[in-house]
Amino acid sequence: GLYRVHQFSKVEMFIFCRPEESEHYHQELIKIEEDLFSSLGLHFKLGAAAYHKFDVEAWMPGLERFGEISSASNCTDYQSRRLGIRYCPASEAQATSAKKSKGNLAPPQFVHTLNATACAVPRMIICLLENHQQEDGSVLIPEPLRPFMGGLSVIAIKSL
């Protein structure tokens, strides 16, 4: 079915940041996901957390359970160590000093990498259709999607 496909399109968000910022940005990614799914009228919850990873699960009436639609992960420096992605931190004294010599610079550090799924298309279609279907079979279009649907507010079944 549409829930377990081998290949699908999705929208991902990525952040490369300093280690001391990674927890802040991880929470920001989760907030973006929550705002997105709330604006679409979906009932969702945060799934059980692994170390710095949260799954977002939406109610899927057809499955009669919550199903994963997104996740947000803070990979700390795991990926950047393997990819050799570093940055040169500047101390406050170095940043304000007019004379920066190479010997005064702090050693390069590995960035922290974070990623989150904004939208896994097949699962989002499942959630939108199942959660917004009306008694007559029509589907209400959530307000944030209407500009992309030519202003259409309902997908109605055409009579033959």
Image: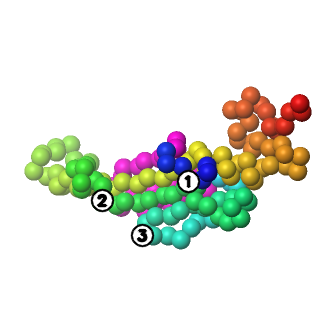
Q: CA distance from mark 2 to mark 1?
A: 31 Å
Q: Earlier in the sequence, mark 3 or mark 1?
A: 1
Q: Check if residue 56 falls in the magenta segment.
A: no
> From this viewpoint, is residue 40 visible?
no
Residue at which label 2 appears: 77
Residue drawn at (49%, 45%) of the image: 7
**Which color scheme is applied?**
rainbow
**As shown in the figure, which amino acid type bears the numbered disc 2?**
Asp
Q: Report which residue position mark 3 lands on.
A: 51
84 with respect to 150 (left or right): left
Q: Which residue is mark 1?
A: 4
Number of other residues with Cα within 10 Å of mark 3, as a class: few under 14, some 14 to 19, many 20 or more: few
Drawn side of residue 152 relative to residue 135, left or right: left
Corner quadrant of residue 76:
bottom left
Residue nearest the observer in this picture, 24 or 84: 84
> Quick check: 50 above or below 12?
below
Circle 3 or circle 2, nearest the eye: 3
Which callout, 2 or 1, points at the residue further toward the start of the chain?
1
Q: How many residues crowd mark 2 within 10 Å: few (<14), some (14–19), many (20+)?
A: many
Left or right of 77 in this view: 136? right
Q: Which residues make up the magenta segment? A: 8-36
x and y, in percent, of residue 51 in the image: 42, 70
Q: Is residue 31 magenta?
A: yes
Judged from the image, the secondary structure of the residue bearing numbered disc 2 is loop
Assign the magenta stretch its main secondary structure: helix
